[in-house]
Amino acid sequence: MSVTLISSFCILLFLIPLLFSSQGIAASPEQQSVAQVRHTLKYSISGSGAFYPYFTNDPHHPGILPDLVERILTQASLQGENIVLPAKRTNRYLAAGKIDFDLISPAWLNSTQRTDPRFVFSQPILPIREFIVTQTPTEPLTNLSGQMVGTVRGYYYHDDDVFTRVDFESERALLKALSKGRVELAIIGDLPARYWSEQDKIDLHFNQLHSQGLLHIRLRAEHGHLLPQLNQAILTLQKTGQIARIETYYLEHTFAGENASE
């Protein structure tokens, strides 16, 4: 056997393991897609647990947010796991990396929280508003400085450094406290306020808009490479009307009696 032939044979023996090594073979688009689907994002969107109609605790009709997130993740070819947590624990879990995202309006956050480098924000999903409410009509409040204000434990308020928080466990408990005179002012989302005031027969007055913004996915920055998929999924669902249909479904069913009486 010639020296040239021996050298060629040795080179071939050296290359064979590389040719068949999984590291030497580029993953196909199908394999990449499977890898993405297997990645499970943990999240919590339950709020106080009484965040109607955004979260209902009904396994058959869980609320606007669970239905939206499930649709977004499916559209993005990602798997998710919803971990039901109180709002305060959700914030701790997200900060510690025990969950990967939540839903939030930047209008709820102060400037430091909005620019926290640990998180990235998705495209906006849908609008959300919260109001300062009182039990009876009063003059509009443009400044909460120095006031004692009823709030929900664990929720963000962009200006809670200027007023004294009086925390309650949920929107429902907050409105009950308002009705009993334990607080004179409360900050609450317009839809939960409407729902619980109707359920518990509590009179209230929407005194002044407190924040108006759009809900976004707040994703831990280490998962930022998934943001283009999530953003494209949100845009697709918006363009095809699926997000609007989910919101309309819950609004119609939540306030069916109220609408019928109007």
Image (spheres, rainbow, N blue to C red):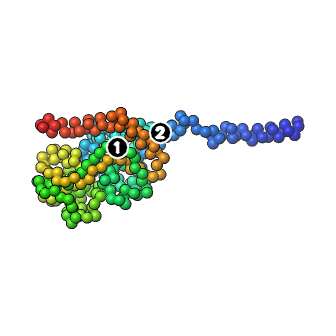
The image quadrant that residue 161 belongs to is: bottom left
Give the amino acid type for the residue marked by disc 2 in the picture.
Answer: Val
Kindly identify which residue carries mark 1: 125
Element under label 1? loop
* Of pointers 1 and 2, the one earlier in the residue sequence: 2
Above or below, 138 against 12 in this view is below
Categorize mark 2 by other alpha carbons within 10 Å: few (<14), some (14-19), many (20+).
some
Quarter of the image for the N terminus: give it. top right
Left or right of 53? Residue 261 is left
The image quadrant that residue 233 belongs to is: top left
Above or below, 90 against 146 in this view is above
User: Disc 1 versus disc 2: distance between alpha carbons?
Assistant: 22 Å
Q: Which residue is at 13% across, 57% downward?
A: 139
Q: Residue furthest bottom?
A: 146
Kindly identify which residue carries mark 2: 37
Give the amino acid type for the residue marked by disc 1 in the picture.
Answer: Ile
